[in-house]
Image (cartoon, rainbow, N blue to C red):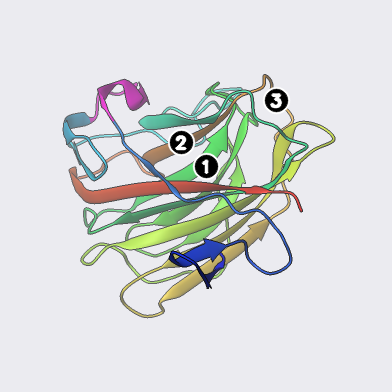
């Protein structure tokens, strides 16, 4: 991120050795207008802000892969603007992170990704973690996660996802996903890398999204507290 160097007025931060430009982290503040969709009306209450808390009712929240062709996601989704227009030639990676303090004791899945603002299959990329199993995966929007090494359950003490998306400067879209999940209980770390190309990506904007769904219909509801999200855009050298 840089290092401290003395000058006539004290210490100042200078660019990291090597000259690569690194943008600061940007905290995401969710609001009522951040909710893109909740087709099943599963959200019973929500408190939004830099730290958010979302409560689901009992029932089917939907999934990242919808039930009908073309399999567009039918789960609750929130989004935020990263950059519009996004300069795909001047950027190399987009980093997105989320952490929670707890989750319901049900097999919910939490998805964190980037997309073009259209809830459609292959219009974005994501990383995911399972609340009860720590299953750690990634894929393109509208497709079931391809899971790798799992972390542990994030039900009781929460956990986080850290995801890197490569930026394709030739085709003006993100491309490929590298995810690490963290759980306060062991095994503490999960990981997965997906080589994916979101071929339906259109437009100039880059948006981030949070989704919460499940692979089964009969869920018990519950609260997802202490949600914090941040992102960082990495410039090319």
Q: Quarter of the image holding residue 51?
A: top left
Q: Residues within 10 Å of mark 1 (few under 14, many from 20)?
A: many
Residue occupying the point 61% across, 34% down? 124
Expressed as whole percent of the image width and height from the top left, the position of residue 39 reads 34, 21
Helix, strand or loop at mark 2? strand
Question: Of marks 3 and 1, which one's residue comes earlier in the chain?
Answer: 1
Expressed as whole percent of the image width and height from the top left, the position of residue 160 reads 38, 60
Q: Quarter of the image holding residue 102?
A: bottom left
Q: Residues within 10 Å of mark 3 (few under 14, many from 20)?
A: some
Q: Which mark is residue 209?
A: 2
Q: Give the alpha-carbon distance from disc 3 to disc 1, as whole Å.
A: 15 Å
Q: Is residue 23 above or below residue 75?
A: below
Helix, strand or loop at mark 1? strand
Please give the residue where the numbered disc 1 appears in the rendered image.
113
Magenta span: 31-42
Question: Of marks 2 and 1, which one's residue comes earlier in the chain?
Answer: 1
Q: Is residue 130 above or below residue 122?
A: below
């Amino acid at each position: 991120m840089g290092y401290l160097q003395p000058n006539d007025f004290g210490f100042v931060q200078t660019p990291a050795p090597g000259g690569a430009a690194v943008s600061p982290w940007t905290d995401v503040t969710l609001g009522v207008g951040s909710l893109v969709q909740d087709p099943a009306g599963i959200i019973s209450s929500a408190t939004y802000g830099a730290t958010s808390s979302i409560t689901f009712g009992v029932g089917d929240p939907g999934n990242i892969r919808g039930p009908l062709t073309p399999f567009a996601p039918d789960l609750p989704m929130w989004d935020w603007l990263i950059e519009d227009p996004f300069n795909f030639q001047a950027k190399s990676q987009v980093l997105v992170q989320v952490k929670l303090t707890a989750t319901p004791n049900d097999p919910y899945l939490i998805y964190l990704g980037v997309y073009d603002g259209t809830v459609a299959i292959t219009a974005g990329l994501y990383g995911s973690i399972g609340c009860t199993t720590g299953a750690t995966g990634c894929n393109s929007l509208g497709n079931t996660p391809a899971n790798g090494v799992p972390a542990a359950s994030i039900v009781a003490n929460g956990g986080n996802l850290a995801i890197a998306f490569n930026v394709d400067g030739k085709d003006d879209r993100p491309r490929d996903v590298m995810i690490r999940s963290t759980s306060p209980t062991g095994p503490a770390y999960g990981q997965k890398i997906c080589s994916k190309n979101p071929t339906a990506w259109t437009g100039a904007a880059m948006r981030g999204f949070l989704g919460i769904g499940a692979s089964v219909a009969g869920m018990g509801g519950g609260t997802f507290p202490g949600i914090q999200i941040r992102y960082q855009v990495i410039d090319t050298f």
